Image: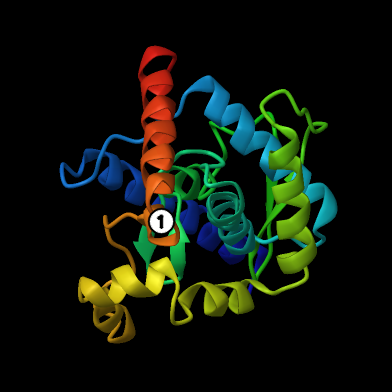
């Protein structure tokens, strides 16, 4: 294949991605994206930097899984959200939709934190700035180190399998809503159903968690 044809194919792929995003933004069935507060963007961006500095050959899919695991582990260990953002039930596991979209072509929200490089196999994430811990508690740092130590050496495929296992929140919601069958039959690869992290909590822990999530939402509305 000639260089000119390869370049043409590359431009076509980028154009298709842009058209898909525009369609996504205009589709009334989807919520408005890019509603994170500055604090949440900073925490997400610096989490990406922290992970990218410690996990070699970090693909986009693997990063999306590790970001989810930060949230899940924080809920399990500390009974508190890590980011306080929604994660939707998609075929390849839980996904923060707005993060996925921002990393799909050229980062906008996270441009100052990470850069993207692509090859024939995957999209890879690289740290672009130094890690800043302004938005992180000591517990947050412990959660990040735990997730990186336990899951950082797993492949993206292995992480998807872990998040799909029986007993996971993804599995429960996917099965209860008929999504797993749709995913298995390749009818769809995404949904608007969100992970309910209270699945991992009991009693007063649920109220504490929900209060904290509502606080995150109120901060996002007041300080977009």
For image coordinates 28% across by 34% down, the residue present is 32
Q: Is residue 212 left or right of residue 156?
A: left
Tell me the element at label 1: loop
- Residue 28 in the image, given as x and y percentages of width and height: 16, 41
- Residue 18 in the image, given as x and y percentages of width and height: 40, 46
Q: Can you tell which quarter of the image residue 211 is in? A: top left
For image coordinates 64% across by 35% down, the residue present is 45
Mark 1 lies on residue = 202
Residue 72, compared with residue 137, is above or below; it is below
In the rendered image, the quadrant that contains the C terminus is top left
Q: Can you tell which quarter of the image residue 30 is in? A: top left
Colour mapping: rainbow
For image coordinates 44% across by 77% down, the residue present is 167
Work out whether residue 51 or residue 30 is closer to the camera in this orientation and state it: 51
- Residue 23 in the image, given as x and y percentages of width and height: 26, 46
Q: Is residue 189 something that shows in the picture?
A: yes
In the rendered image, the quadrant that contains the N terminus is bottom right
Judge the density around disc 1: few (<14), some (14-19), many (≥20) Cα neighbours within 10 Å.
few
- Residue 193 in the image, given as x and y percentages of width and height: 27, 57
Work out whether residue 80 or residue 144 is closer to the camera in this orientation and state it: 80
- Outermost residue toward the top? 222
Q: Is residue 114 something that shows in the picture?
A: no
For image coordinates 67% across by 64% down, the residue present is 3
In the rendered picture of this protein, how many numbered marks are placed on residues? 1
- Outermost residue toward the bottom? 185
- Outermost residue toward the left? 28
Q: Is residue 184 left or right of residue 117?
A: left
Residue 214, compared with residue 51, is above or below; it is above
């Amino acid at each position: 294949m000639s260089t000119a044809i390869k370049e043409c194919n590359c431009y076509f792929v980028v154009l298709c991605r842009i058209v898909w995003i525009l369609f996504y933004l205009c589709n009334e069935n989807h919520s408005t994206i890019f509603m994170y507060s500055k604090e949440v963007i900073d925490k997400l961006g610096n989490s990406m930097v922290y992970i990218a500095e410690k996990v070699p050959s970090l693909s986009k899919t693997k990063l999306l899984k590790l970001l989810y695991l930060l949230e899940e582990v924080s809920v399990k260990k500390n009974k508190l959200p890590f980011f306080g953002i929604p994660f939707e039930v998609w075929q390849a596991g839980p996904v923060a939709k707005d993060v996925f979209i921002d990393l799909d072509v050229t980062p906008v929200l996270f441009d100052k934190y990470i850069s993207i490089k692509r090859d024939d196999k995957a999209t890879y994430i690289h740290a672009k700035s130094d890690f800043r811990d302004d938005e992180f508690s000591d517990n947050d740092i412990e959660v990040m180190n735990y997730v990186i130590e336990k899951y950082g050496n797993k492949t993206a495929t292995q992480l998807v399998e872990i998040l799909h296992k029986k007993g996971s929140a993804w599995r429960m919601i996917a099965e209860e809503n008929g999504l797993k069958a749709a995913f298995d039959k390749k009818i769809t690869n995404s949904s608007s159903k969100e992970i309910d992290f209270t699945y991992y909590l009991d009693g007063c822990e649920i109220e504490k968690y929900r209060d904290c999530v509502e606080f995150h939402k109120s901060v996002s509305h007041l300080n977009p």
